[in-house]
Image (spheres, rainbow, N blue to C red):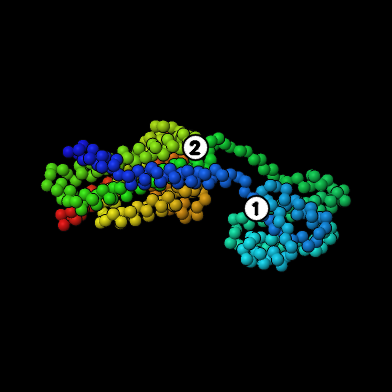
């Protein structure tokens, strides 16, 4: 009897066009869209530096030109400070650097020599690199002045200005094929597996409203058989979805899949947790709209907090800690461990165990809520 229920559920879902949209078409659209955005973003980010050089001296020109040595910074001379401030207040520019008259003279005599950096704090992300650049160029001018002074008094400037600590940079390549798409593929795969909950909720509600559940109560079918018969088909569907999306990433974006055994076991654990939660939602929800709404909260909220959209390192600390309580985090962490860091099954055992515990919790809640579900069917 349970085998017949599994086959019936599979046939019914294979005819559902909405399932194909939510589970396959939509995630591929998201992957292609965000893959295009991040692939074209690259590393060629340009920061504009509007400036006003009122001094118009040789040293002030050297200072300005030093700011524009890197291709990442583009200098834009402004007509006047008043005009630049007006543009800044209007939001047309984010910063303006002002070198007042007397800059060169003050620099030569070693007097206090302020330059003015006006900015709009709303655009702090784009301001910080410009501020750091201005500080570095200012320090280099200060070092040149100090070097000249030391040489005048007969002191070895090179020895005196040699840093006490030398920083040696070493680049450690995790995976030559790693890029933004390596995070996007598993991230959106995990996120869209939770959308199976919508199909499950709709299926359970239809069984409830059609009287099928009420009729099943008069058969020898137990609650465990019914729930497992409804659960297994969706596990298979989610596994097919994960396989399709990862295969898409492999052939289209050349994403490294890593250890196939590890990624298979992790995928099974992910399929079990998403569908067990879908089963819990299905026996608790009263209508399709409620199921869709709750699924959106779980899928999108979990994606944001669990680090599916961006690495968790970019999130606030309290969000990072909160993400540890979500299955999305452990699923994504497991996929990244396998696909990027070359992990094997032993490296993701904790991730798999946590996902299975979440799956068990979902199944237990569904079993405990089944009596209420049956009561609603009879009512």
Q: State which quarter of the image contains the N terminus.
A: top left
226, above or below 86, in the image: above
Which residue lies under the disc numbered 2?
Answer: 253
Location of the C terminus by quadrant is bottom left
Label 1, label 2: how far apart the Cα atoms are: 30 Å
Q: Residue at x 81, y 55 (%)?
A: 59
Left or right: 85 in relation to 183? right
Q: Secondary structure at mark 1?
A: strand
Tag 2: Cα neighbours inside 10 Å, few (<14), some, or many (≥20)? some
Residue 264, picture quadrant: top left
- Front residue of 164/254: it is 254
Q: Is residue 38 above or below residue 124?
A: above
Residue 178 image offset from top left, x and y in percent: 53, 38
Q: Is residue 327 above or below residue 95?
A: above
Residue drawn where x is 50% and y is 54% of the image: 316
Answer whether labels 1 and 2 touch (C-beta < 8 Å). no
Marked residue nearer the N-terminal end (1 or 2): 1
**On the image, numbered disc 1 is attached to which residue?**
47
The answer to whether 115 is drawn above or below residue 225 in the figure is below
Q: Is residue 257 left or right of residue 163?
A: left
């Amino acid at each position: 009897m349970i085998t017949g229920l599994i086959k019936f559920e599979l046939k019914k879902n294979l005819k559902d066009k909405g399932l194909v949209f939510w589970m396959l078409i939509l995630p591929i659209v998201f992957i292609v869209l965000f893959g295009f955005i991040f692939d074209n973003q690259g590393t060629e980010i340009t920061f504009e530096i509007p400036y006003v050089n009122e001094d118009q001296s040789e040293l002030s020109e050297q200072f300005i030109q030093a700011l524009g040595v890197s291709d990442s910074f583009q200098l834009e001379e402004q007509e006047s400070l008043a005009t630049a401030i007006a543009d800044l207040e209007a939001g047309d520019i984010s910063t303006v650097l002002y070198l007042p008259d007397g800059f060169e003279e003050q620099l030569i005599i070693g007097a206090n020599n302020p330059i003015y950096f006006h900015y709009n704090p709303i655009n702090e992300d784009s301001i910080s690199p410009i501020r750091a650049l201005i500080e570095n160029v200012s320090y280099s001018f200060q070092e040149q002045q100090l070097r000249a002074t030391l040489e005048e008094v007969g002191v070895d400037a090179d020895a005196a200005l040699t840093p006490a600590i030398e920083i040696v940079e070493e680049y450690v390549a995790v995976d030559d094929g790693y890029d933004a798409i390596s995070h996007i593929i598993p991230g959106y795969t995990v996120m869209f597996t939770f959308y199976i909950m919508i199909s499950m909720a709709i299926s359970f509600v239809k069984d409830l409203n059609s009287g099928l559940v009420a009729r099943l109560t008069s058969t020898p079918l137990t609650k465990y058989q019914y729930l497992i018969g409804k659960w297994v088909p969706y596990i298979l569907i989610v596994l097919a979805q994960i396989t399709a999306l990862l295969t898409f990433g492999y052939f289209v974006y050349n994403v490294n899949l890593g250890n196939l055994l590890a990624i298979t076991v992790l995928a099974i654990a992910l399929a079990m947790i998403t569908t067990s939660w879908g089963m819990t939602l299905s026996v608790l929800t009263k209508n399709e709209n409620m199921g869709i709404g709750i699924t959106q909260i779980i899928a999108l909220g979990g994606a944001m907090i669990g680090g599916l959209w961006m690495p968790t390192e970019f999130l606030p600390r309290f969000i990072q800690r909160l993400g540890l309580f979500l299955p999305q985090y452990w699923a994504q962490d497991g996929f990244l461990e396998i696909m990027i860091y070359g992990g094997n099954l032993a490296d993701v055992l904790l991730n798999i165990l946590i996902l299975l515990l979440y799956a068990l919790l979902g199944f237990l809640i569904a079993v405990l809520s089944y009596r209420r579900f049956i009561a609603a069917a009879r009512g």
